[in-house]
Amino acid sequence: MNTESNLKLDSFVQTNTALTENASIYETNVSTKAQADQFASDLDHLLNLKEEADQPIKWLIGEKNAIKNVLVDKLYPLSNALVCYANSVPSTEILEKASISKNTLRLLSELDLIAFNKQIVSMARQHVADLPAFGISEENIVAVETDGKAFEQKRSDLIVLKEDKANAKNEYRLLQKKINNLLNSKLDYSIENLRATHPDFVNYYFAARQKAKGAQRHYDLLGYLKDKATGQAIALGKVSVEGLDLTTHITENGTFRFKHFPEGEHRLIIENINYKTLYVPIRRYASERSKLYLEMEAIPLEVI
C-alpha cells in the first residue's frame, strides 16, 4: 500500500478507537450506533484485506528460481544425452527436438522451459534402455521429472498469490472509498451533532478524522471584510493562521484569500490598525471552496 493509503488506514484505526472508548455517549442513538458499528465492521475487513494485499512474495520467487536453476542443471545433461543417442542412431527427429545449448536453456521463458522439460522427459522414457550408455539412468529421468513438476507448481503458486494480492488491493480500494463515504456523508455529521453536550469527545474524534484524509490536502479560503457599523469594505491589514506560518494580506477591496489552506481545525487572526483584532475559528474537512463574510468593529477615536 502507498503512503497515503497507509495514513488513511492508521487514522481509521484511531477514529475507531475514539468511537470505541466513548461508545456510551452515543449507544442510545440508534442511527449513530448503527453507523459506528458499520464503520467498525468495514474497518475489520479492511485490515484483513491489507494483510492479504501486503503478503510478501519474494520468498516464493526465490524458491521458484532456485528450483528452476536445479532443473536446468539436471535437464541439460538429459537433453545432451538424447542428442548423443540421436547422433549414434541416427535420428533427425530426436536431434531436432533435444538439441539446445545450456545458455539457451536458461534463457527460455518459463512456459517454454516447462514444455521443453516435458518433451525431453517423454523422449527419455521412450529410450530409457539406451541412455545408460550416455550416462543417464532411470533415476536421472525421475529426478528431472520431479523437479519439473515442482517448478511448475511453484510457478502456479506464485501466479495465484499475485492474483490474490491484486484482488485484495482492488477490493481494499473499493472498501476504503465506501468507508470514506460513510464517514464523510453520515458519521461525521452524527458525531458533530454531539458537540454541544460532549465537546471533548467530538474534538477527539475529529482529530483522528483529520488524519483520515491521508496525505495533507489544501483548499481555497476566501474572505470578505466589512465595517460592522457602516457596511463598508475594510481595506488593508493582514490575516494569519494561529500557530502556523501562514499569512495573507487584505486587499483594498476588503478581501483576502488563502489558495492553500490546510484541512483541520484552525483559528484566523484578522488585523487592521483601525479595527479590533478578529479571531475566527475554521474547520476544514471538505474539498469545496470556502467563503467567509465577516464584520469587524472599529476602534473608537480618542476624544482630546
Image (spheres, grey):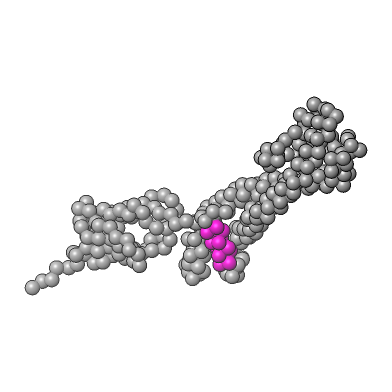
Residue at 32% across, 54% down: 258
Percent x, y of residue 69: 71, 48
Q: Residue at x 55, y 57 (%)?
A: 6
Dominant secondary structure of the magenta stretch? helix
Q: Name the quarter where the N terminus is drawn.
A: bottom right
Q: Is residue 143 visible?
A: yes
Considering only vertical position in the picture, is 224 above or below 299?
Answer: above
Give the magenta part as a residue range: 6-18
- Quadrant of the image occupied by residue 25: bottom right
Instruction: Specify the farthest residue to the top.
Output: 92
- Based on the displayed image, in which of its 4 quarters is residue 140 positioned? top right
- Total marks shown come to 0
Q: Residue furthest right?
A: 129
Q: Is residue 87 left or right of residue 294?
A: right
Q: Is residue 194 left or right of residue 148?
A: left
Front position in the image: 47 or 103: 103
Q: Where the C terminus falls, by quadrant?
A: bottom left
Depth order, front residue of 170/18? 170
Q: Please report the residue visible at 44 percent of the width from the left and 57 percent of the height from the top.
A: 216
Q: Is residue 125 magenta?
A: no
Q: Taking 129 as reference, is 175 above or below it?
A: below
Residue 22 figure quarter: bottom right
Q: Give coordinates of residue 178: x percent, y percent.
A: 58, 50
Residue placed furthest toward the bottom:
304
Picture layout, residue 260 above or below residue 271: above
Image x and y of residue 272, in percent: 22, 63
- Please name whichever residue, 211 or 202, is drawn nearer the observer in this view of the structure: 211
* Residue 16 magenta: yes
Please report the residue visible at 70 percent of the width from the left and 37 percent of the height from the top.
101
**In the rendered view, would you say 14 is above or below 77?**
below
